[in-house]
Amino acid sequence: MDKNRVVITGMGAITPLGNNVTQFWDHLKSGTSGIDYVTKVNKDDFPAKVAGEIKDWDPTKYMEKKETKRMDLFTQYAVAAAKMAVEDAKLDITDEIAPRVGVWIGSGIGGMTTYDEQFRKFMEKGYRRVSPFFVPMLIPDMAAGQVSIQLGAKGD
């Protein structure tokens, strides 16, 4: 058995129950539901009319506006939660420890928001209107990649 240990020293959260750990935990303890009527997609296209959506999202609290244009929402959420966790841990990722700091994020699928937007552009306006960032915004490993870049984590 490997003797290396992983220690969780900080937390961050972007959830339908709140956009930080305190909001999330308070709403969870009080039994508040994060499920509400769908607002981010045309609900006429789906039989379900409710979902757990992120509310009051402002990515510029965590990254430059220019960067948000190149990231799907799932990547923005990952970057924000990771930055909160690092801040909560009071971790300073220096050049010295960066090779020992790794990022692992499990995801079955990537940027579905981007996929939907770009598919609609393609169908309505043609292929020239599809963003050159379409594929990088779509792939599931982009969340871990952007978190690593934003935090300066260089480990494996």
Image: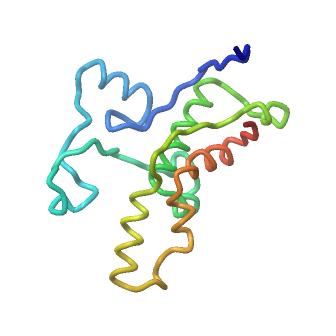
> In the displayed image of the protein, which residue is found farthest to the front?
1
> Picture coordinates of residue 112 (x, y %)?
40, 57
With respect to residue 146, does 21 lie above or below?
A: above
Q: How many marks?
A: 0
Q: Quadrant of the N terminus?
A: top right
> Picture coordinates of residue 21 (x, y %)?
44, 27
Quadrant in the picture for residue 65: bottom right
Nearest the viewer among 28 and 58 is 28
Nearest the viewer among 11 and 115 is 115
> Is 125 displayed left or right of 110 in the figure?
left
Color scheme of the displayed model: rainbow
> Is 90 displayed left or right of 19 in the figure?
right
> Is 110 displayed left or right of 55 in the figure?
right
Q: Residue at x 58, y 25 (%)?
A: 88
Nearest the viewer among 82 and 43 is 43
Q: Residue at x 72, y 39 (%)?
A: 153
With respect to residue 22, does 63 lie above or below?
A: below
Quadrant in the picture for residue 43: bottom left
Quadrant in the picture for residue 122: bottom left
Q: Quadrant of the C terminus?
A: top right
> Picture coordinates of residue 76 (x, y %)?
50, 49
Q: Residue at x 68, y 48 (%)?
A: 149
Q: Residue at x 57, y 30 (%)?
A: 85
With respect to residue 77, does 114 lie above or below?
A: below
Nearest the viewer among 63 and 130 is 130
> Picture coordinates of residue 77 (x, y %)?
47, 45
